[in-house]
Amino acid sequence: MSKSPFPRRPRILLFGSSNTDLVLSCQRLPQPGETLLGGEFQRHHGGKGANQAVAAARAGAAVVFVGARGSDDFGRATAAALRREKINLRHFRIHPHLPSGIALILLGGASRENLIAVARSANDSLTPKMVQAVRSEFSCADVVVAQLEIPLAAVREIARQARAADVPFLLNPAPARTLPPALLRQVHTLTPNEHEAALLTGESDPARAGAALLRAGCHQMVITLGARGALLVDADGAKIFPAPKVRPVDTVGAGDCFTGWLATGLGAGLPIGEAIPRALRAASLSVTRAGAQASLPTWREVP
């Protein structure tokens, strides 16, 4: 995006993955061992890091994207798509001996639920040394963002560098995995969904899970609840923010849309209570369209 709705464009330093999504839409999701015929195939740009970078750029942020891709056609197409969004790719490394990221996605049922598998790729090559090599970027950022489609050692270094630069670190803990307490204590804003919050804490109730993460040292949690909205848990307690009601077409990338827009709002200095509803409106609009990145709205579309 060349313009921004803010007096000063928030600056986001975003570390993460980039994938090409190979999507098959079915009448329902298959059972293990079952073959379904007649699905519709589509190819989209994706990857949690790239999705969040595009979401933030369309929300009005100036985004620096740090990651890795192969030298193949998938990687070249990914880079071209990110450049069209005016995302800074000076730290988007080309790895000549690894393939670019690929995700296989099944969509099915009236709710358009999804199953996703991601191949090993250049996304797995991001190291703490590569994070340290871009240390100067941290002091220029308003918010630092990462997810878990890159190695955990790199994420831990990102958190350390953000803390050293006194910049808020927003972590989207997806795909879900257990996280070390030392990392959680360095997180300013954590954005898990219900499943991820339960895995991190052992608590199935989102409010109790949020309280447990608060005790673990996170500054604040925003737990996404799908069509029900989002739950903020911070030192003031727990508060639910409802989502607009929409008819879903494709839920892939909705969480990434929410995270990108939330990061942009926080980077622009909005209170968390204003940034969450704005991010929910954007995410709700995204699920009414197909494609992870193609569905992401611009700031002009979100009231």
Image (cartoon, rainbow, N blue to C red):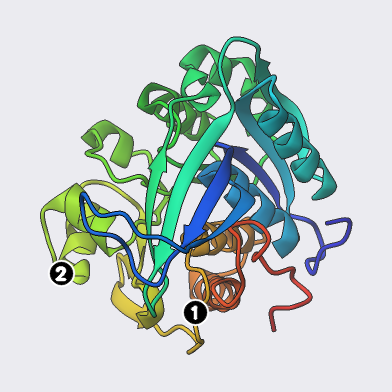
Label 2 to label 1: alpha-carbon separation: 25 Å
Residue 3: quarter of image: bottom right
Q: Secondary structure at mark 2?
A: loop
Camera-side residue: 268 or 236? 268
Number of the label disc, if any, that sits on residue 248: 1
Q: How many marks?
A: 2
Q: Residue at x 52, y 78 (%)?
A: 277
Q: Indicate left or right for 61 with 243 as reference.
A: right
Residue depth check, mark 2 versus mark 1: number of the one nearer the observer: 1
Give the mark, 2 or 1, whose residue is nearer the N terminus: 2
Camera-side residue: 264 or 141? 264
Number of the label disc, if any, that sits on residue 205: 2
Residue 58 locus on image (x, y percent)? 73, 60
Q: Secondary structure at mark 1?
A: loop
Residue 130: quarter of image: top right
Amino acid carrying mark 1 in the image? Pro
